[in-house]
Image (spheres, rainbow, N blue to C red):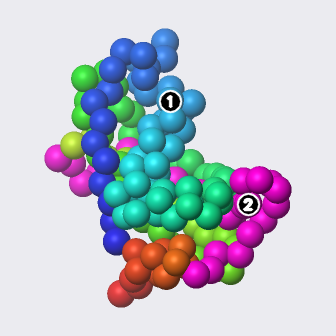
């Protein structure tokens, strides 16, 4: 299941070259992942079980510049799910365009928030994630 989050690009998102700063992209992508987790009910389960996901690896590929005044759409989808980790892909497009401005891949693990140790992805959380994982065609 692909989830979409739209953002207007404002002056504070841009750098001296006038395009979105790479660090600001990370903030926008994170906000889109949080919205994805909230909208599909994952945040309630994580809060209930005192668990959280942390990013252990990220890859970003910039393909087209985005500037102040543009509106972007971030598409977020879960690509893979293992017993304790998974991968989320996020694509950024200018609103109304098919061309990808940024492609990213985030590898995450599940951790116990109290002990700060890795946890298995199981039970209700696993069931929910299996229901939203990208289906290969």
Residue 75, image x, y percentages: 35, 56
* Position of residue 51 in the picture relative to residue 114 (left or right): left
Residue 105 falls within the magenta-colored stretch: yes
Question: Residue at 25% of width from left, 23% of height from top?
Answer: 69
The answer to whether any part of residue 17 appears in the image is: no
Residue 20, image x, y percentages: 44, 27
Whether pointer 2 and pointer 1 mark residues with C-beta atoms closer than 8 Å, the reply is no
Q: Badge 1: few (under 14), some or many (20 or more) residues near its Cα, within 10 Å? A: some
| Quadrant (top left/top right/bottom left/bottom right) for the C terminus | bottom left
Instruction: Tell me where the magenta segment starts and ends, as one range.
Output: 96-123
| Quadrant (top left/top right/bottom left/bottom right) for the N terminus | bottom left
Q: Nearer the viewer, residue 40 or 90?
A: 40
Residue 19, image x, y percentages: 41, 24
Residue 17 falls within the magenta-colored stretch: no
Q: Which disc, if any, is residue 24?
A: 1
* Position of residue 84 in the picture relative to residue 42 (left or right): right
Tell me if residue 126 comes above or below residue 66 in the rendering.
below
Q: Which disc, if any, is residue 91?
A: none
Tell me if residue 51 comes above or below residue 69 in the rendering.
below
Tell me if residue 101 comes above or below residue 105 in the rendering.
above
Give the structural element (helix, strand or loop) at label 2: strand
Q: Quadrant of residue 13?
A: top left
Residue lying at the far top of the rendered structure: 16
Residue for badge 2: 112
Real-space Cα separation, disc 2 to disc 1, in angstroms: 28 Å
Q: Quadrant of residue 39?
A: bottom left
Sequence order check, earlier mark of 2 and 1: 1
Question: Residue at 45% of width from left, 42% of height from top?
Answer: 31
The answer to whether any part of residue 23 appears in the image is: yes
Give the structural element (helix, strand or loop) at label 1: helix
* Front position among marks 2 and 1: 2
Question: Residue at 56% of width from left, 61% of height from top?
Answer: 48
């Amino acid at each position: 299941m692909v989830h979409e989050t739209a953002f207007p690009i404002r002056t504070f998102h841009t750098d001296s070259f006038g395009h979105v700063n790479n660090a600001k992209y990370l903030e926008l992508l994170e906000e889109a992942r949080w919205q994805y987790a909230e909208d599909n009910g994952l945040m309630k389960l994580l809060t209930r079980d005192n668990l959280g996901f942390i990013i252990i690896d990220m890859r970003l590929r910039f393909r087209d510049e985005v500037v102040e005044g543009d509106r972007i759409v971030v598409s977020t989808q879960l690509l893979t799910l293992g017993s304790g980790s998974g991968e989320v892909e996020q694509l950024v497009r200018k609103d109304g365009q098919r061309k990808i401005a940024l492609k990213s891949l985030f590898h995450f693990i599940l951790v116990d928030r109290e002990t700060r140790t890795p946890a298995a992805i199981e039970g209700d959380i696993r069931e929910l994630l299996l229901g939203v994982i990208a289906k290969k065609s």
